[in-house]
Amino acid sequence: MMALCSNSRDNKRIILQMSVWQEWLINLAYVYPQNPDEQKVSDMVHSLFRMLLYHAIKFEYGGWRVWVDTLSIAHSKISFEDFRLEVSKVYGGAGSPDHGFNSDVSAGRRTSTNGVDRPDTPTEPDASTENSDAVSITETEVRSETNTSVNKDATITRNRAGSSKLAKATGQQVFSTGPTPPAFRIPDFKWSAIHQRLLSDLLFSIETDVQAWRSHNTKTVIETVKAPENEIFITNTLHMISQSVDNLIIACGGLLPLLACATSPQNEIDTVEPSQGLSIEIVISFLQRMVNLVDVLCFASPINLANLEKEKGLRKGGILRQSLRLVCTSAVRNCLECREKAKQRLGGGRLSVSGEGAGQEAPKSDHMQSLIGGVQPTPKNIVENLVGQHPVTDVERLLQDMDINRLQAVVYRDIEDSKQSQFLALAVMYFLSVLMVSRYRDILEPEVGKEGLSRTSSVVDDRSTVTRTASVMSSGSTMTATAEPGSQDAAGEKMDEISLRRSDSVTSHDAPNQEGISAIRVESSAAGEVKPSDGDDESRYTTSQLPKNAPSFTVAPVSVANLTEKLERALGTTAALLREIVLDFTPYLSKTLIGSHGQELLAEGKGLSTFKDSTSVVELVMLLCSQEWQNSLQKHAGLAFIELVNEGRLLSHAMKDHIVRVANEAEFILNRMRADDVLKHAEFETLCAHSLHQHKENAKLCDRLITSARRRDHTFARRTVDKILTVMMDSHGTWQMSGNTKVKRYWKLDNWEDDCRRRRRLVPNPYGTSHGEAVLRSSGPSTTDEIPLEDAMQQAEEPLHARLASLGFGHREVPLEVGEDIDSNSEELEMEYNNSKNVGPLTFTTECRLIAPGFALKGTLSITSNDLYFDADEEDPEFQNMDIEVIRYCDNLHGHWSFYDIRAIFARRFLLQSTALEIFMSTRSSVMFAFNDHAAVKKVVRALPAVGIGTKYGIPQSRYASLMSPRKIFRQSNMTVKWQRREISNFEYLMYLNTIAGRTYNDLNQFPVFPWILVNYESKELDLSQPANYRDLSKPVGALNPSRKKFFEERYTTWEHDQIPAFHYGTHYSTAAFVLSWLMRQEPFTTFFLNLQGGKFDHADRTFASMAQAWKNCQRDTSDVKELIPEFFYLPEMLVNSNRFNFGKQDDGTLVGDVQLPPWATSPDDFVRLHRMALESEFVSCQLHEWIDLIFGYKQRGPEAVRATNVFYYLTYEGSVDLENVDDPIMKDAIQNQIRNFGQTPTQLLREPHTPRSSLMHVSPMIFRPILEDTCGSVKFPSSSPICHISANTFPQLPTPSIVTIAVNHTYAINRWNVPTNAAGSGGANYGDAGADPSQAVLPLMTVDPIVATNPPPHNPTRRHLGNDFDQRVQLRSGSFATTVDSRYIIACGFWDHSFRVISADTGRLTQCIYGHYGTVTCVARSECNITSDCYIATGAEDCTVLLWVWNARNQCISGDGNVPGEGPSAKATLTGHEDAITSIVVSAELGLVLSASKGGPVLMHSTLGELLRSLEVPGEFRAPDLLIMSREGMFVTKYDHANMAVYSLNGKLLKAVTGPEKIESMVITRDGEYFVTGGEKGIVRLWRTFTLTPLYSYPSLDGPVRSLALSHDHRIIFVGLSNGSVTLLNLDLNKWHQEYQKRYD
């Protein structure tokens, strides 16, 4: 601290700007140091104070206030320390002082440096107090008591002695809480040793600067004082002196008592009593140092004192009046020293005190020596350096030259201010007159004493008091006087009136009636015997000591010349000053000094001539001793002088009050700071505890992350090994190449979802088994079918329902808007995310449950800045009790997902509570988490990317969208409008409703629900045009049978249960048991089913074995009202026992295996196809909205549900129970089990009837208008080279729809597609209709590329040429090229350098050349995509491998495996298994499949992750597949040899194989896979039905062999590329062959 403060002014300023900085600096030291080390510390603290205070005075504007604050805070601290010692002493404590400033220490008694005793501090406790209670009072306790009782008197109760005696007498141990300590109150200010040292150090620093000014070589002191840079220093110093000087004057006894001593005949110094805790010697030292500073900084300075007075709040002229009091005090002290030295030099002894003064505590000699010694040099007193000599230079003189000059400077400094100067002149005149008359008496008295004459002199009473009277006594009369100086300055301010009384000071035998000025004496109080005290705020001096008569004495016959010489020497300089003042202020004095009869005493020719013309001191003194002058001076000048003195006393009291007030204010600030410190300390402790807890949590988190990473790596390694084993052990793997042994393969349903959320893909199951241990159970109750109502009521015990009723769950109405207002505003949510976004590795961590089919695992969800992690708690008992076979099928026990892979986030329910999230990934899978409350859900959504619910439903992507209620999503989505306009299918719309209503594949209790469509499961033929084959969708399943409906309605109306509301159905239409019973033949649901059934299959009679029987059960069983699941419309594998599970035999001996299909279905695939066709039929489309009302709409609950016979058990509805308000864990588990057993009703999406679907004729009025012509156009290119590839990018969303054609001679053309105007309006325009409006067919459908048309061969432009680097061995086919969806880039293969290239279609320039194969690339394919999304590019080569690449739509290039901008191209996956060159490839991003064929080899199916799934079965004698086509619905058509074709399902099942009539050169399939088109070498284009490979239509033969085919986006135009270099456009109307619409064309 000292080093910092010594060398840096900024550091000092920083400390000074701190709040109450003095308090903590004081706490560094000791008030009463008891050893040298403590003394050293205290000295260092004093040094710091000196530097800081000096800096404040020297450099800081208003720095004098720092001095006042320091005095106040130090006073508070020292007073408190003394208070603690006193209280400790009173209550028997040892009273060890605490930190503070230093003091002298001696033998158990602390004494301050000025001799004032400190409280005793015994070093050892007294034996008598050993058993007494000791009170330890700390600063916090006492100061806290001060805050509550600062205005109350403190009382101390002392009853410990009585308690101790009682305890000794009774022999009992008495426990006392101890006496109540008194409250601490800041006492009146006194100058302690600490204050004295602070003042001394500060004065020393100031004096050092002044001395430096004096010793300057080039500048005088006057010049330095006038310098502007010293203005702050001078101002602050004068303020500091002004603040303390009056108090110091009072501390040394006061000006009036000192003057009384100086004018008394016997030098009665014993009347002067020091006060304020200071000794006379120290006070005189301070005053002498201050007066020397005033000489330089005030009298020699041109500074405007009025500004200082205004700043300090003094009256006008206040500083000069303070200076006059200081100068007068210094002059009186010098007079006393002169008189004392004169007596000692003449051999006169010390005067004895007469009267009652003999009993004073301090002798007169001590006071006199203190007065004299106060100006002696001290270690830090450089007064002698300032003045150059001792203040007393001539003991014979009345006033020293320095005093004369100071008095003169006071009067004449601001002479322009006449009123103040006049007042000062009047006061100085009285002061000089009193001293001169007194010295005149002193000069005469020694002479009388030599002749033996005696004189009676008055004795000054030492017990004097200051009183206030209402009158001024003069010659027996009374007058009233107002405050001076000047009535103008005292306007409105009434001063205390002063009593002036004449007293006989000197009585002579010869002249008893003479009166004159002989002495000033303080009036004695006859009754009170009270000494003067500065503590009396109401005290004032009076002028009663001013003598009424002139001195009376007898003059011995002595030499007149000798007396005159003494008078001249003693009073000469003083008389000169008096004459000067009188002459300069004659106009004012002549009006003020009025005689007893009103005459002017200073009139011309009278008293004025004595001052003006005479130079005789004797004459002047005699004039002053005259009766008239005595009366006037007493009456007027004496009043001004006493006014001056009383003002000083008032300022002294004001200074002490101000210090106490500032100390209290500082104490208030400190208390507030201490309270803040307590709060901050508590906050700090809390923060430390939180940090420690956070550190421990982070350590646990690190351990958990490390453990989870290890487990994740282990899981990944295990899966990789399983994948490798699967690939190696495949029929085309390395381990099976030469052997004939086949390993049985098991399959499971993959989590991959297509765009319609269908999970159709089967993948190898490394954990597959036939479950031979699942022994059939005996016949008995089953959990597969819902138990009867009575059993359900038995399960739900009465206490449970009573408890739910008490909570208000059983009978409360379902809220109208469940989950409607779960969030406030999207902008607020996004702002919360921006404010709470953390920068760091870990953003958010929370406990949750992973919701997967069959279980809910506890774990921890961790979110970083770019990734999402879930780690299951494998130590949880629930996890450890789970079947290991079930856990194997969970892919996300230790999951890791990148934010880049997150595509949509949906708010979900779990056990009817809105506490879950389902996150959809780019890997076409989803993961679901359930949290403790909805607040955690919101936090997770804020921490995840703002993807909303995706882009599919027409809602902007935002975090608010992820938390929207299902009803809001339904209202704001555009899917209903699309369904009404028939832009999406019935299946897609139902999946959309299930998705937004909270139905999910991850929770078997909330599995998507689909309706029963058909009722005919027994006939051999199914006519989908007959209404009798369809179910009534306006009724729930339970109400389809009239007799059963009546039973349910009677149950509802006759229900009488106190706790359970009435319902129709005690079972639900969708439960986990129902879902598993439907899917029990397909893994992993088989394992889940066994886990639910206790490891055993159910009895064969209760097993789902027949569609017809399942429908019958739903019609007649009162406990079976279940609906279907989506898999009935797309997954034929669920009906086949492909894994050969042993389900047992039914009672009639029938072996349960595959599901028995209706007679009208030839295979499971046929059943699913017809079932889906029925779902999309017009009969269902017209009624589907009514079924939606039952499940998702206004008939789901309420009165409409009652009328529709559609009320289920109350615990199945959303909002019926609030698990967050159930604290009892047993009760909570019971409620959850009830919810699991009875199922969950979807969220209600609408409260009004759902709008029906528009009719087909309303949407497309021209859809069934016949097409008269097969050909609608033809284009011939100038090159006449065969068109080997056509890409029809005709989507109307494109900026420029076009058809890209590529010829064998490596030229290409970008032909514009002119969308017909009637096509946009009708939605079903017939492009080739001859009856169309001619104005609508001005432009041909396809316009030839103008660059190609204007540059015929041999002038082929380079902008439309692919180059000549192709390998001549490779035959260019349709599969040799691919284009981007916007026709901007062409991807070509077949180059000799084993590369494939990306070429700009507009410029023909090479933009990217990609290497990866070790042979010539023979084929390339692009997956389906839209304009802005990425897609896959698959390439096959002669090296027998297929490489999968990613096309980055944003950067328009092949990107790396990580799909990061700027990364070099690299293959995402390498697909192996072929043994010869690849001939054809198709890839589907939606299905996640890659199909590839090789010369003479098989057709292999890989996933886009690189897994070899299966090899397609080759029918009969088919060989050499060379053409592949695949629809988005998963239908594959493979062309073998020349004209052999085979169709396969998505999972590789051979459905049909045929041989065509001619060699097929090209094929193209429709999007839904229902139809495909072939073109042969004879120029005939044929249309085929895919499922049955039935030819439907053959177009007329064209002008040449067909080399390429393409379909327009709406499947209404077939683009045919011929070998003659032309492109022919054929009309296509698929409605002609639709099973419902074909009759319209008959």
Image (cartoon, rainbow, N blue to C red):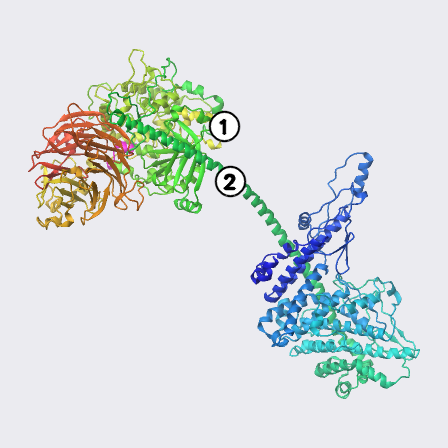
Q: Quadrant of residue 1536?
A: top left
Asked if marks 2 and 1 touch (Cβ < 8 Å), the reply is: no
Label 2's element? helix
Magenta stretch bounds: 981-990
Indicate the amino acid at tag 1: Pro
- Please count the marks in the image: 2
- Nearer the observer, 538 or 433: 433
Badge 2 amino acid? His
Residue 300 falls in image quadrant: bottom right
Q: Which residue is labeled 1 in the image?
A: 1225
Image coordinates of residue 143 in percent, x first then y, are 67, 50
Where does the N terminus fall, quadrant-wise? Answer: bottom right
Above-or-below relation of 1284 to 645: above
Q: Is residue 855 left or right of residue 1562?
A: right
Q: Position of residue 1257 (x, y in %)?
A: 19, 35
Q: Is residue 603 visible to the viewer in this orientation of the structure?
A: yes
- Sequence-first tag of 2 and 1: 2
Inspect the magenta stretch and tell me whether residue 265 lies in it.
no
Instruction: Judge from the rendering whether residue 293 lies leftward or rightward of residue 1444; answer left or right.
Output: right
Drawn side of residue 1421 relative to residue 377, left or right: left
Q: Quadrant of residue 1572?
A: top left
Q: Position of residue 1155 (x, y in %)?
A: 27, 19
Residue designated by label 2:
695
Label drawn at residue 1108: none
Looking at the image, residue 914 sits to the left or right of residue 290; the answer is: left
Task: Tell me the distance, in whole angstroms, between the alpha carbons under discs 2 and 1.
Answer: 31 Å
Q: Is residue 987 magenta?
A: yes
Which element type, helix, strand or loop, lies under badge 1?
Answer: helix
Front residue (pair 750, 1194): 750
